[in-house]
Image (cartoon, rainbow, N blue to C red):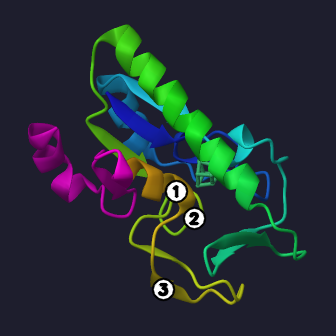
Amino acid sequence: MYLISACLAGVNCKYNGGNNESELIKEIMREKECVLVCPEELGMLPTPRPPAEIIKGKVIDKTGKDVTDNFVNGAEKALEIAEKKSAKLGQKIELAILKANSPSCGCGKVYDGTFSGVLIDGDGIFAALLKRKGIPIITEKEFSNDNRRIIHDKF
Ligand code: SF4
């Protein structure tokens, strides 16, 4: 079973009310059991909402509000949902396909907290939690047609 950032499947849960729909991800969803989660909505944040970035371990939105608790709670809820589905299906969570650069779902690179589009090394709050649980992660940027077969064979 794969865990997927809901916005990649076309769910309008992105901070601006839109999504990051990917045809490739939707194709994968037809072939594989998947669970879709949006940790920010699960953290009781509204959609649309101000964009947020990680600054010194805290998540701060563009208005200056500290939304760290929403992000942490939402990440925990998202994992719980995935684990419940995994137990129900009797399938482990083989792979998480997450939205690149997000303060929740970003893996390896996130924005630097200045809201200026600069990326630095780091993980979003949800991605960091999944890493601690040992769940392999790739972002939609790495999940291309070129490496799809390899990923399918591996997971
Ligand atoms: S929290 Fe993740 S799933 Fe939700 S909109 Fe942001 S990137 Fe997409």
Residue type at mark 3 is Ile
Give the distance between the C-alpha atoms of the residues marked 3 and 2, in whole angstroms.
12 Å
Q: Is residue 144 magenta?
A: yes
Which residue is depicted at the point 28% across and 47% down? 134
Give the distance between the C-alpha atoms of the residues marked 1 and 3, in whole angstroms.
14 Å
Which residue is depicted at the point 74% across and 51% down? 70
Q: Quadrant of residue 53?
A: bottom right
Is the CB–ligand 1 distance for label 2 below 8 Å?
Answer: yes
Of callouts 3 and 2, which one flags the residue occurring earlier in the amino acid sequence? 2
* Residue 6 visible to an observer of this rendering: no
Q: Nearer the viewer, residue 86 or 49?
A: 86
Which residue is depicted at the point 68% across and 71% down? 58
Q: Which residue is mark 1?
A: 105
Residue type at mark 1 is Cys
Span colored in magenta? 131-155
Q: In the rendered structure, are the residues bearing label 3 and label 2 in contact, judged by CB atoms less than 8 Å apart? A: no
What quarter of the picture does the N terminus occupy? top left
Residue type at mark 2 is Ser
Q: Which residue is mark 3?
A: 120
Q: Is residue 134 above or below residue 57?
A: above
Left or right, 15 with reference to 139 = right
Q: In the rendered structure, are the residues bearing label 2 and label 1 in contact, judged by CB atoms less than 8 Å apart? A: yes
Q: Which residue is mark 2?
A: 102
Q: Quadrant of residue 12?
A: top right
